[in-house]
Amino acid sequence: MECSTRQEGKFMIVTLAGEVDLHYSPEARKQILAQLNDKNHVLVDLSGVEYIDSSGIASLVEGFQLARSKQLEFGLVGVSEAARQVLELARLDKVFQIKATIAEFIDH
Amino acid sequence: MSQTLIKKRFKAHTYQLKQLRDWVRESAGKAGLTDERIEQVVIGVNEACMNIIEHAYNETSGDIIFEVIQAPGEIIFQLTDFAEAVDSSCIKSRELDDIRPGGLGVHFIHEVMDKVEYLSGKNGKGNTIKMIITLT
């Protein structure tokens, strides 16, 4: 798994790529929660995710809940087919704010 | 007649999950499943293995055996551990409307597999999960 962060407009973009499984998801969780604890609005870019398991999804849910408690924005962008399949299995595809591009969040 | 397509023994550690997913893809491909079905099976077996690592062994060390058996009308993806026997009535998913981290693995397994069976070993040791795909 690769995990990187960058700023775009008011958002910190956390990009996850490769295979986000139980071995790597603690790192993804740490990055997402650290940005929210620093009071940043967060978008998680999933366009390069080839596989994500329930532990990776749990990291996203935790981010979603922390953002809500801190009144910060949190969304998913460029969700890959592999990630979408698992979000749908978890019935979370209607819970998260999901858009195709970062620009759509910024223009919103 | 049943045929074992693959049998592997490995350490119960998260770094093994990628290798396990590759074995699942290889054996499910041999069994003739479609690419879409293979990826569903990968999700189910990966989640079952995560549960063994996190809950059955619970940070202790141990081995897992992965087997794929082609039987008449079905393919069985099976994981066996040597941890304390788990009461299968305690293995359940959370309610999906209760949005919180975790508790989704069992739901995923049951969603992607046609049938799931839990077996306990003798003398309170060991567990086997049989995840079955029915061939139509």
Image: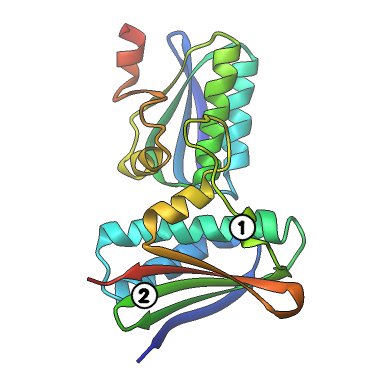
The image position of residue B23, as x and y in percent, is 44, 70
CA distance separating discs 2 and 1: 24 Å
Residue located at (58% from left, 56% from top): B50
The residue mark sitting in front, 2 or 1, is 1
Residue located at (56% from left, 34% from top): A59
Q: Which residue is mark 2?
A: B75
Q: Helix or strand or loop: what does disc 1 sit on? A: helix
The correct choice, above or below, for A4 with respect to B19 in the image is: above
Task: Report the chain holding disc 1.
Answer: B
The image position of residue B13, as x and y in percent, is 65, 60
The image position of residue A85, as x and y in percent, is 34, 43
In terms of depth relative to the viewer, which is nearer, B134 or A5? B134
Q: Earlier in the sequence, mark 2 or mark 1?
A: 2
The correct choice, above or below, for A49 with respect to B61 in the image is: above
Q: Is residue B46 left or right of residue A101?
A: right
Q: Same subunit under labels 2 and 1?
A: yes
The count of marks equals 2
In terms of depth relative to the viewer, which is nearer, A81 or B78? B78
The three-letter code of the residue at mark 2 reads Ile
Question: Mark 2–mark 1 contact, CB under 8 Å?
Answer: no
Label number found at residue B89: 1
In terms of depth relative to the viewer, which is nearer, B46 or B136? B136
The correct choice, above or below, for A107 with respect to A13 in the image is: above
The image position of residue B103, as x and y in percent, is 57, 43
- For residue B131, what is the image quadrant? bottom left
Residue located at (56% from left, 21% from top): A65
Q: Is residue B14 visible?
A: no
Mark 1 nearby-residue class (10 Å; few <14, some 14–19, many ≥20): few
The three-letter code of the residue at mark 1 reads Ser
